[in-house]
Amino acid sequence: LRQPSPSTSTSPGRARGSRREAMPEKETPQARFEKELAVFKGMQEALQKTYESRMGLLAQQQETELVKEEFETIEDDAVIYKLVGPLMVKQNLDDAKANVEKRLEYISGELDRSNKVIEGQEKEVQDKQQVLVRMQEEAQQMAAGAGAAA
């Protein structure tokens, strides 16, 4: 019995060592465009999530500002309670005011950070959009050139 040589194949398909199998197929312009478009859509979704996160921070900031305004109008001998889990715990007015101030500082810092992230993401989305437009224009020029040649 003879064994098939490595250059022949007993199964349908290409023979081993064929030139096409050895070289990876070049990505078509359409495939590259679709890949870039998928990346672009992912970037847009990430940007949208960042916008939503920022909106949540703005809502927290407004709530905390309202609490701060309430503290300014409250009498010095008023009793303040803080919700800790399922319990209402008595809290000193000065401590409560300090906690609100710290919270406002924290939220402000998070908003600054969020704004910087948004700026960066918006720039990346714009850059990717320009790449996609360029790729589309090149494809149209190639199609027009192929159409004129035919």
Image: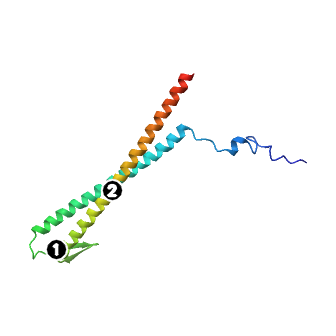
| Label 2 with label 1: CB-CB less than 8 Å | no
Percent position of residue 81, x then y: 19, 74
Under circle 1, the secondary element is: strand
Which quadrant holds residue 27? top right
Which circle's residue, 2 or 1, is located before the other in the chain? 1
Q: Is mark 2 on a helix, strand or loop?
A: helix
Q: Number of labelled discs?
A: 2
Q: Residue at x 34, y 53 (%)?
A: 118
Picture coordinates of residue 10 (x, y %)? 80, 43
Residue marked by disc 2: 116
Residue 131 vertical placement versus 104 (above, below):
above
Q: How crowded is mark 2: few (under 14 residues within 10 Å), some or many (20 or more)?
A: few
**Label at residue 128:** none
Q: Is residue 87 above or below residue 38?
A: below
What mark, if any, has residue 80 been given in the picture?
Answer: 1
Q: In this view, does 93 lie to the left or right of 140?
A: left
